[in-house]
Amino acid sequence: MTSHRPERLSEMIREEIGEIIAGELRDPRVGLVQVTEVKMAPEMRVAHIFVSVMGGAEAQRASLEGLLAARGYLRAELAHRLSVRQIPELRFEIDRSAELGSRLDRLLRRAAKRSSQP
């Protein structure tokens, strides 16, 4: 029987980190950031936090820098909010799935247009 603990912890971290970023984090580098997914490493010592950032590459870079600088604060806040023995190390990454999805849509439309031409 498999444990659902990693999935539950991932969801709790996603919700709490999202609330902290939106309401309490005061770093001016962090723009409009949404936590899209949290994946736990198998041993649950590392949480890979995927974020979507409004804006271009510069906004993404600045927001990622701000989040990396705030890791200690975020872990401390999670320790207060979650009843778990050990708070995992937080690793932030830009979620590129929306970009990939729109690129795939463009490619499919282009292919469909070409196939419908005589």
Image (spheres, rainbow, N blue to C red):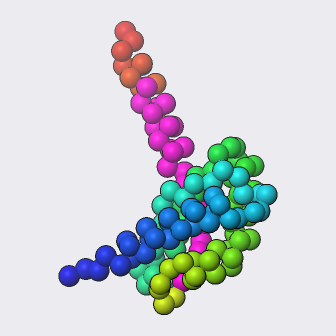
Image point 36% across, 15% down: which residue? 116
The location of residue 84, given as percent across then percent down, is: 47, 85
Image point 48% across, 61% down: which residue? 37
> Which residues make up the magenta segment?
87-109
Q: Nearer the viewer, residue 50 or 8?
A: 8
Which residue is at the far bottom?
85
User: Can the viewer see residue 46?
Assistant: no
User: Can the viewer see residue 87?
Assistant: yes
The location of residue 104, given as percent across then percent down, is: 46, 37
Q: Nearer the viewer, residue 105 or 118?
A: 105
Q: Nearer the viewer, residue 48 or 112?
A: 48
Q: Is residue 92 magenta?
A: yes
Q: Is residue 52 magenta?
A: no
Q: For this view, does 94 lie left or right of residue 24?
A: left
The location of residue 4, given as percent across then percent down, is: 31, 76
Q: Nearer the viewer, residue 69 or 25?
A: 25
Q: For this view, does 30 lie left or right of residue 89?
A: right
